[in-house]
Amino acid sequence: MFIPNHLWTHNMFVKRYTRIHNVRITHTLVLKGSYGHIGATLLF
């Protein structure tokens, strides 16, 4: 009973951490994309 529960908790932690990490990556890409869009607007 303990081992499956431990694995479940571990999986939930990994999923939560991965989701937060992906949000940070997406946020960084969005910021870079916004700056890239502004730069393109200035160039053209």
Image: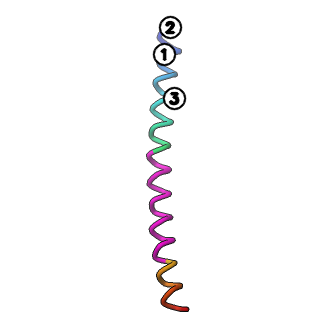
Give the mark nearest the N terminus, 3 or 1. 1
Query: Dot 1 surroundings within 10 Å: few (below 14), some, or many (20 or more)?
Result: few
Query: Dot 3 surroundings within 10 Å: few (below 14), some, or many (20 or more)?
Result: few
Inspect the image, locate mark 3, and give the three-letter code of the amino acid beneath it: Asn
Position of 22 relative to 10 (above/below): below
Query: Of the numbered discs in the image, which one, if any, rests on residue 5?
Result: 1
Q: Residue at x 49, y 43 (%)?
A: 18
Q: Residue at x 51, y 78 (%)?
A: 37
Look at the numbered discs 2 and 1 and tell me whether their residues touch, using CB distance below 8 Å.
yes
Residue 12 % position (x, y): 48, 29
Q: What is the span of residues highlighted in magenta in the rendered image?
A: 20-35
Quarter location, residue 27: bottom left
The residue closer to the viewer here, 21 or 27, is 27
Question: Looking at this rendering, what residue extends furthest in the top direction?
Answer: 1
Residue 42 % position (x, y): 48, 89
The residue closer to the viewer here, 42 or 9, is 42
